[in-house]
Structure formats: C-alpha cells, structure tokens
Image: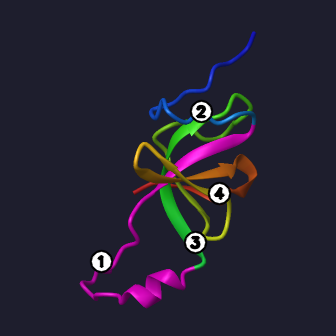
Amino acid sequence: MIEESRSLDTTLEPLDEYVVVQPVPDETETRAGLILPASATDAAPCRSGIVTAIGADVTGVDVGDKVLYPRSAGYDVRSGGIEVKVLKREELIARVHD
C-alpha cells in the first residue's frame, strides 16, 4: 500500500523523507516584555515553523506541528508566493508545544 503525502500546500509535495516547513516570524518581544533587536534573532542558531506537508516516509511529525530546526538546514523555496523550507525529517530538532 502506498501512503500519500498529507499536505496543506498542494503546490509543493515533498518526496520520501522530506518535509515542507513554513517558518514563523522570529519573536521580537519576550514574555517579560523586553524587545529584542533584529540582530539578536538573526544570530539564533534555530528557527521554528509549521509543517505544511510531509513525504510518504516521514514519521514522528504531522502536518500542522510546530517544529524547531537549525537556521542553516534545508532548502529555501518560494511556493505560491510564500517562503518555505524543504528539510529532511532527520534535520528537525524538536516538536514545540505552546
């Protein structure tokens, strides 16, 4: 049985062990109300994003999950006018529950 890719973004369907992640904007204000300059968020080694599509061989994450990944990981792709990242599943660091 072939498992189809589950996708919210029908214009980009990842293959095999790849996932499509839409990066969320870096937080510029802490919970305590401190405002962080852009240079502080650009220097952060990790980013977070929402998984919008997964390949057939991906396990452990689902479409709609918020995940953490290295800033330098994957490929930057423009899909339907939106910037997304295409990453291998193994490049994801964690699932974020907020």
Residue at (59, 32) in percent of width and height: 13
Q: Earlier in the sequence, mark 2 or mark 4?
A: 2
Q: Earlier in the sequence, mark 2 or mark 3?
A: 2
Q: Position of residue 51 (x, y in %)?
A: 52, 45
- Which numbered circle lies on residue 13? 2
Q: Type of residue at label 2?
A: Glu
Residue highlighted by disc 4? 75
Return the residue nearer the eye: 13 or 31: 13
Magenta region: which residues?
A: 17-44
Residue highlighted by disc 1? 31
Q: In what element is the residue under mark 3? A: strand
Q: In what element is the residue under mark 1? A: loop
Distance from Cα at disc 2 to Cα at disc 1: 36 Å
Q: Position of residue 87 (x, y in %)?
A: 66, 52
Q: In what element is the residue under mark 4? A: strand
Q: Type of residue at label 4?
A: Tyr
Q: Nearer the viewer, mark 3 or mark 1?
A: 3
